[in-house]
Amino acid sequence: MLTIAVCDDNPQFAHQLTARLRELCAHLLPERVECRITAAFSSGEEVLRYLRESSIHILFLDIDMPGMGGFDLAARLKDTAPDTLVIFVSAYDDFVYSSFEYAPFRFLRKSHLEEELPVTLQKVVEKCMMDSETVTVPTLEGELTFRVKDILYLEGEGNYYTVRTSDGEAFRCRSTLSAAEELVAGYDFFRIHQGYLVNLTHIRAVGDDGALRMDNGATLYVSRRKLTAFREAYMQFTRRRLTR
């Protein structure tokens, strides 16, 4: 069940957007996707109070609000609700460039709501569904299930490999990295050399020499023979993210 919310200090627009989201969820999304639209919030403070007890998967957030503005709330959500996908909504196109700092999923223009909202909703729901996908691996502690998005990289050593996760944990598995590569086939992973299989989502920077800086601060290196293939795969991955 995906929870979708609107936060806007203009009650008329908030009602309009909430009603349109209900229509689109009922008629546009696949039957397997269940959505719940909350009552609209009129301030960032209301959203934070709600999040103390419940979760919001997708938040359509106005930028220009009195008190806690949309940018301020988005900054708070990075710490308090990092899994909430934010879509900024504004009547001012000038805000689009300022919004990049807060890594929103998308930016919606109020004046183009009818044409932009259906595509945006489809894309953000697809992202939520992908983020919830899991894999089960044979760790030394027994079979454990991980969200694909939480795996930073897998580190191989002979007939074992280690799963490194985004919360800093490591789980040793009694299997080969080649078997793990088959397990995550279809997701955005790349075998950078014999010993490492990385999640492209968690690459923070790519050096000219093939050095990859990961989200946990680790530096991994793409083997020379795989460097060309990696650059092509990473370029395609980046294009997909920019056009999501």
Image (spheres, rainbow, N blue to C red):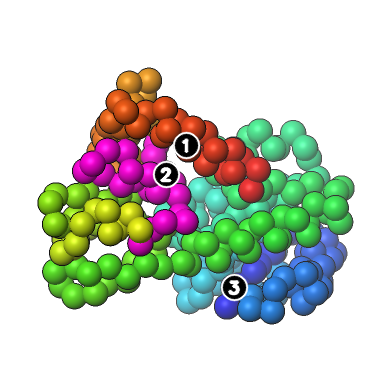
| Contact check, label 1 and label 3, Cβ < 8 Å | no
Question: Can you say whether 2 is above or below 209 in the image?
Answer: below
Upstream in the sequence, badge 3 or badge 2?
3
- SS at mark 2 in the image: helix
Quarter the N terminus occupies: bottom right
Q: Amino acid at mark 2?
A: Leu
Instruction: Give the residues drawn in magenta, as a range.
Output: 183-204
Callout 1: 10 Å neighbours few (<14), some, many (20+)? some
| Contact check, label 2 and label 1, Cβ < 8 Å | yes
Instruction: Tell me what residue is drawn at x 32 percent, y 21 percent.
Output: 209
Q: Is residue 195 magenta?
A: yes
Q: Is residue 214 left or right of residue 14?
A: left
Q: Amino acid at mark 3?
A: Leu
Residue closest to the eye, 226 or 117: 226
Question: Can you say whether 125 is above or below 187 in the image?
Answer: below
Image coords of residue 27 (percent x, y): 80, 74
Which residue was labeled with disc 2? 200
Image coords of residue 123 (percent x, y): 66, 57
Circle number at residue 2: 3
Instruction: Tell me what residue is drawn at x 55 percent, y 51 percent.
Output: 74
Closer to the observer: label 1 or label 3? 1
Which residue was labeled with disc 1? 234
Instruction: Tell me what residue is drawn at x 59 percent, y 73 percent.
Output: 2
Q: Amino acid at mark 1?
A: Tyr
